[in-house]
Image (cartoon, helix red, strand yellow):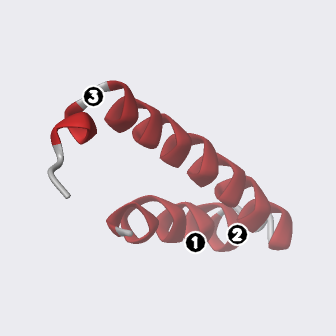
C-alpha cells in the first residue's frame, strides 16, 4: 500500500497537473504503478520466503 502513496500519487500529480496531461497522465501513472507493483510482487513471490510460513 505504501507504493501507492510513494509512486502512484506523485506520478499522477506530476503527469496530470505539472505536465498538464490531465486524465491521460493519470491513466499513464496508473499503468506504470501496476507494472511496478507487479514486478515487486513477482520479486517477493520468487524469493520463496513465503514457503516457510507456518499456518
Between 8 and 41, the residue placed more toward the observer is 41
Disc number lying in front (3 or 1): 3
Q: Position of residue 11 (x, y in %)?
A: 55, 60
- What mark, if any, has residue 16 been given in the picture? 2
Q: Are marks 3 and 1 in contact (CB under 8 Å)?
A: no
Q: Position of residue 42 (x, y in %)?
A: 46, 33
Q: Quadrant of residue 14?
A: bottom right
How crowded is the residue under tag 3: few (<14 C-alpha within 10 Å), some, or many (20+)? few
Q: Disc 3 versus disc 1: distance between alpha carbons?
A: 36 Å
Q: According to the image, label 3 marks what residue?
A: 48
Q: Relative to 17, is 52 on the left or the right?
A: left
For image coordinates 48% across by 66% down, the residue present is 10
Q: Quadrant of residue 23?
A: bottom right
> Which quarter of the rendered picture does the C terminus lie within?
bottom left
Between 34 and 46, the residue placed more toward the observer is 46
How crowded is the residue under tag 2: few (<14 C-alpha within 10 Å), some, or many (20+)? some
- What mark, if any, has residue 13 been given in the picture? 1
Disc number lying in front (3 or 2): 3
For image coordinates 33% across by 37% down, the residue present is 44
Q: Relative to 10, is 2 on the left or the right?
A: left
Q: Secondary structure at mark 2?
A: helix
For image coordinates 61% across by 42% down, the residue present is 35
Q: Relative to 39, is 6 on the left or the right?
A: left
Q: Position of residue 12 (x, y in %)?
A: 61, 67
Q: Residue furthest front?
A: 55
Relative height, residue 47 to residue 50 (above, below): above
Q: Are marks 1 and 2 in contact (CB under 8 Å)?
A: yes
Q: Secondary structure at mark 3?
A: loop
Q: Disc 3 versus disc 2: distance between alpha carbons?
A: 38 Å
Between 7 and 52, the residue placed more toward the observer is 52
- What mark, if any, has residue 23 been given in the picture? none
How many numbered discs?
Answer: 3
Amino acid at each position: 500500500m505504501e507504493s501507492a502513496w510513494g509512486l502512484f500519487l506523485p506520478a499522477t500529480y506530476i503527469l496530470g497537473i505539472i505536465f498538464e496531461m490531465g486524465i491521460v497522465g493519470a491513466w499513464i501513472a496508473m499503468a506504470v504503478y501496476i507494472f511496478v507493483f507487479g514486478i515487486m510482487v513477482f520479486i517477493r513471490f520468487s524469493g520463496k520466503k513465503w514457503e516457510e510460513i507456518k499456518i
